[in-house]
Amino acid sequence: METRTALHYGPSAGRSNSNAQEYLIFHIPGNPGLIPFYDPFFSTLHTLLEATSALQACNFHICGHSLAGFETSIQDATGSAELVGLEQQIDYMDELLYARVDEIRHETGSTPKVILMGHSVGAYILLEVIRRHRKQIESKRYQDFDLIGGVLLFPTITHIARSPSGIVASALLRIPGSAHIGSAIVKTLLYLIPTNILYHLVRLIMRFPEHAARTTTALIRSPMGIKEVLYLAKDEMDMITNDKWGEEIWGAATEPGTTQGDTINSNLVFFWGSHDAWVARKTRDELIRARGARIPLKRVESTPEEAWKPTMFIDDGKIPHGFCLKHSETVAEKVSDWVEDIIYNHNEI
């Protein structure tokens, strides 16, 4: 069973406006890093944004790509049997972002404004991509684009090993060769089960919807998928520790005078689960106190002390960390509002 390695929802036929501003919403997945997990989320978000009256002068391109090492067929594999660590994943997503910007620029004749999205470890990668974007602007190595904001969903950006699940995972992943051992155990146990029966077992036992069961089955059957999940998780436990970013990253501030006229501040929106097993409440609350704004996202007239700070929310419901499995529509509704606010705030600066 194979799945796509990329998703792209562009302007609907008959709606694309040549005079409209192009927007690229570039999503970075969590771990497991298979982008088809997010298909219903992308589809719902695309529908909501195109139906928003305030955004009729916008052409949206919602894109995402699987993390490296999660290819579900030999044909899609990168050509290397090596496992891919967190730093390499950052490199990979950074390259794909610039490639996608260039693709849209070539197709439409204009440079899109960019809003990043990241889920779980994808939020950590998002912040690192912003940091690199600033460096690339300063060095003038690339033709610039306007990065106007970011949405970080269930972010694991500090001290993941202190979370309830992280405590267990870090202990198991300290075992030498844990990625290879774990993969061998899974494949041995499921080797004799035909793929179509495995798919139905995943749906029945996990109570997954069709897209999640199909993607999970593809992950299990993929050449490197289970090994990559565990190998990347080990890197997450080791690397995601202290808050490593300065105010210029938290506010996503960009240098003035770039080719697309980046704003002084981009908007970052954080959304945490109320009971997230991959985020320690203490570290989450400390981060909110230290970094979060105490005012709404639409803060054009905010004080200088607050203007650079991101907006941070904690879910008041029970949306789980893996929202893309069964709660795509609920989260897409929230993200649609935040995207509208980011565009509004950017245009008002």
Image (cartoon, rainbow, N blue to C red):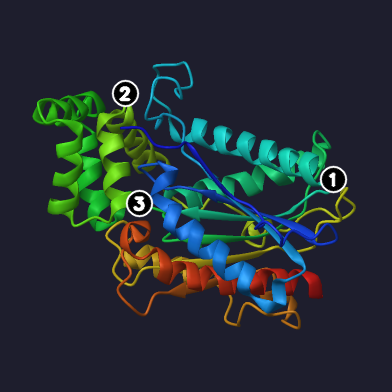
- From the viewer's perspective, tell me whether residue 345 is left or right of residue 4: right
Quadrant where the N terminus sits is: top left
Dot placed on the residue nearer the N-terminal end, 1 or 3: 1
Q: Are marks 2 and 1 in contact (CB under 8 Å)?
A: no
Q: In the image, what residue occupies the spot 50% across and 73% down?
A: 334
Residue 70 quadrant: top left
Q: What kind of element bears circle 3? A: helix
Disc number at residue 146? none
Q: Nearer the viewer, mark 1 or mark 3?
A: 1
Mark pair 2, 1: CA separation? 39 Å
Q: Amino acid at mark 2?
A: Pro
Q: What kind of element bears circle 1? A: loop
Rendering coords of residue 286 (x, y %): 43, 68
Pick the front one: 245 or 155:
155
* Residue of label 1: 109
Q: Residues within 10 Å of mark 1 (few under 14, many from 20)?
A: few
Q: Are marks 1 and 3 in contact (CB under 8 Å)?
A: no
Rendering coords of residue 168 (x, y %): 19, 47
Rendering coords of residue 246 (x, y %): 62, 55
* Residue of label 3: 160
Q: Residues within 10 Å of mark 2 (few under 14, many from 20)?
A: some
Dot placed on the residue nearer the N-terminal end, 2 or 1: 1
Mark pair 1, 3: CA separation? 42 Å
Pick the front one: 298 or 131:
298
Q: Amino acid at mark 3?
A: Ile
Above-or-below relation of 11 to 107 = below
Q: In the image, what residue occupies the spot 79% across and 60% down?
A: 17
Q: Nearer the viewer, mark 3 or mark 2?
A: 2
* Residue of label 2: 223
